[in-house]
Image (spheres, rainbow, N blue to C red):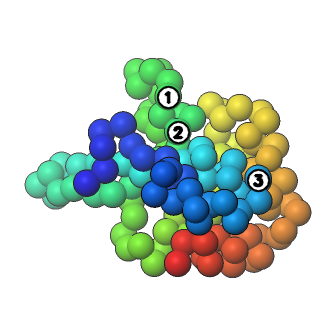
Amino acid sequence: LVPFGGVPLISSITADRAANLNRNFKVLLDNLELVEERDYQQGGRRLICLRCQNCNSIEPESQSGPYTKVLTSTKDLYKVIMNAHLHLKSCQCTPTSVKNTVTRVGATLGNSTLTSLMKDYCQ
């Protein structure tokens, strides 16, 4: 299972695959991490989630919680990343330089091309 602190989407496990991505894609993925959460409404069932590293890094009492999305299957990982892409562009905790880079990824490629490239990367 995922360690308590989370695992960045680009880690030693995925470094070879990420080497083929352009810098802007790497910035997008570098700001997201995989974490394990518990669904206490379903008896403490363990869930694997994608979380924003930026809004996770501030004090929990000062916010409603970090952006976290449950992964229902690995085939949908690219969809969850695309939703996180939208979050990163507006996250108050994301540095401006990262927001600009993430925004540039979508603006340069177009949303359908970005989705297609992310789907290929996640397979």
Identify which residue is drawn at 60% across, 46% down.
30
Q: Nearer the viewer, mark 3 or mark 2?
A: 3
Q: Position of residue 81 (x, y in %)?
A: 57, 61
Quarter residue 91 falls in: top right
Q: Quadrant of the N terminus?
A: bottom left
How far apart marks 3 and 2 lie (CA) works out to 17 Å
The local secondary structure at tag 2 comes to: helix
Vertical arrangement, residue 90 with respect to residue 22, above or below:
above
Vertical arrangement, residue 95 with respect to residue 122, above or below:
above
Location of mark 1 (residue): 57
**Residue count near mark 2 (Cα–Cα under 10 Å), binned few <14, some 14–19, many ≥20:** many
The local secondary structure at tag 3 comes to: helix
Contact check, label 3 and label 1, Cβ < 8 Å: no
Identify which residue is drawn at 36% across, 70% down.
72
Judge left or right: residue 117 versus residue 39. Answer: right
Identify which residue is drawn at 76% across, 53% down.
24
Contact check, label 1 and label 2, Cβ < 8 Å: yes
Instruction: Say which amino acid is labelled 2.
Output: Gln
Judge left or right: residue 94 versus residue 78. Answer: right
Contact check, label 3 and label 2, Cβ < 8 Å: no
How far apart marks 1 and 2 lie (CA) works out to 6 Å
Labelled disc at residue 24:
3
Instruction: Say which amino acid is labelled 3.
Output: Asn
Labelled disc at residue 53:
2
